[in-house]
Amino acid sequence: MRRLRADLRYCLGRYYGAYLDAQAAVDRDPTDAAGWVVLSQAAARLNGATAGVEAPRRGIAAVGPDPALLKQLEQLRAGKSSESTARVQTGRNPADRTEEWPGNLGALARDIVLKMQRKDWEAARTLVHSARQTYPDTMVGPWLDGIVEFSQDHLELAEKHLLEALAVAPRSHRVITSLAGVWSAQRGPAYAGDQLVRTAERDPGFAYPLPIAALAFLEARQPARAEAAIRRAFDLLPGSAVPYRKLAEFYLELDRGSEALAICEEGLGRFPQDVGLQLQHARVSALLGDREAAIRSYEKVLSIRPDLYLAAGQLAKLLVAARKDGVSQRRALQIVRQLESNAPSDPLVLGAMGWVYLKAAHKAKRARELLEAAAKDAPEELGVRFHLAVAYTRTGKTELARRELRAALESGRPFEEEPDARRLLREIGDGEPQKHPVAR
């Protein structure tokens, strides 16, 4: 599986990730000739043909004169690059994050949404009927039926269809989320919270409804019940790190950072190798101002998952923010260059790369491009918007910088660089026109 993922990553232009996966594959099975080929291809893409030659040589020593390895070695010596042995032509931009559905379902779902937007309900129902016939015995038809009825405020009918969908797919996140909306519209958010907790309790091991229930109770201004709903996950998943992650997220949502950190540390005491908890610990530590603790957590994550781009990006960003020594600055730039070789699309990764280029390499134009892409895909990430404002300031686009700073500061949500954002807005001015007394 690591070799197959290496090949897929290579096809998508994510060469460093492909290199790491291929290396893991041949470490596990030195006779995997295809793994050696992908390792060679990725190494050549990253560091040139000379670097790619070592892998087929080592592969031939382990496997023997395999034809694919001999061909790869010959092509590299000739200065050419071969295609991956299982090359998949996707025909799409890897940065395209549009959700995909199997078969023609995507086009059908988009058509139904278009009909609903136009309030052409009969046409929407006709398409849903078609979905029921095309995908019988699945949740698709009744779920779409429920969505169409909910859009018209036919709440009882919507609930009926969605419960039908839930019976077919009792762990469908889509159905659960849709039902939460219907229940809230029927009898208020507290009722929705109760129903979601019951749904989770009917299916031990399925804790997905509980965080949604907590949000519903918060909307109903019942914070104690919200926390109790989240804590029910400890009973339903006693041997899992998931409840610790969810409770930490909940505390963070309520701006209770110290409690979020405490629950992360409690969870890591039981599950020290859990990547999700390590990521939470790093995030909370950074928010609380302990950047060195955050760096240690991201280092731990990368020791477990060296191909986790989000952790690598956040580590690079922290290295330039927390440390001023040349070694840390160079390491941050090295991480970012490796990330660029992986064609990342995650906005947080793009944002981290942009910040490192701005701070450590003084490449304001490239930084601005990356930060603009990040802010476009994740406008709710306030730190990214602040970093984009800094990039705009460096490139003389002061009014755009003011726009980003106002958006971040007026959101009402805390973020790590909030004091810096307020300081920068004072420095560049708020842009409001000056009022002058009228001459008499």
Image: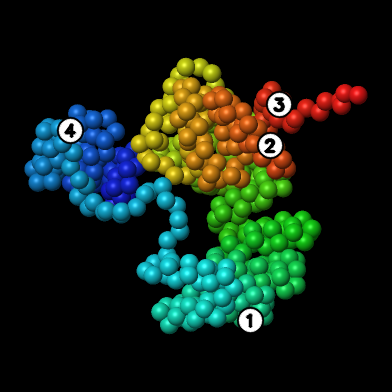
User: Do residues under tags 3 and 4 come within 8 Å of each other at their CB atoms?
Assistant: no
Q: Label 2 vs label 3: CA separation?
A: 11 Å
Residue 188 position by quadrant: bottom right
Q: Considering only order in the chain, which callout, 4 or 2, is on the residue closer to the N terminus? A: 4
What residue is disc 4 on?
53
Give the left or right position of residue 7, taking residue 121 as reference. Answer: left
Tell me residue 307's x, y (percent): 40, 41
Secondary element type, mark 3: loop
- Going by the numbered disc 1, the residue's amino acid type is Leu
Label 4 or label 1, whichever comes before in sequence order: 4
C-alpha distance separating marks 2 and 4: 53 Å
Which label lies toward us, 3 or 4? 3
Residue carrying label 3: 429
Evaluate if marks 3 and 1 touch, with contact meaning CB atoms under 8 Å apart.
no
Mark 3 or mark 4: whose residue is earlier in sequence: 4
Front residue of this view, candidates 135 and 108:
108
Between 236 and 395, the one lying in front of the other is 395
Q: Quick one: label 2 or label 3, which is nearer the N terminus?
A: 2
Q: Position of residue 292 (x, y in %)?
A: 58, 28
Q: Which residue is mark 1?
A: 157
- Give, as a three-letter code, the residue at label 3: Gly
Q: Label 2 amino acid?
A: Arg
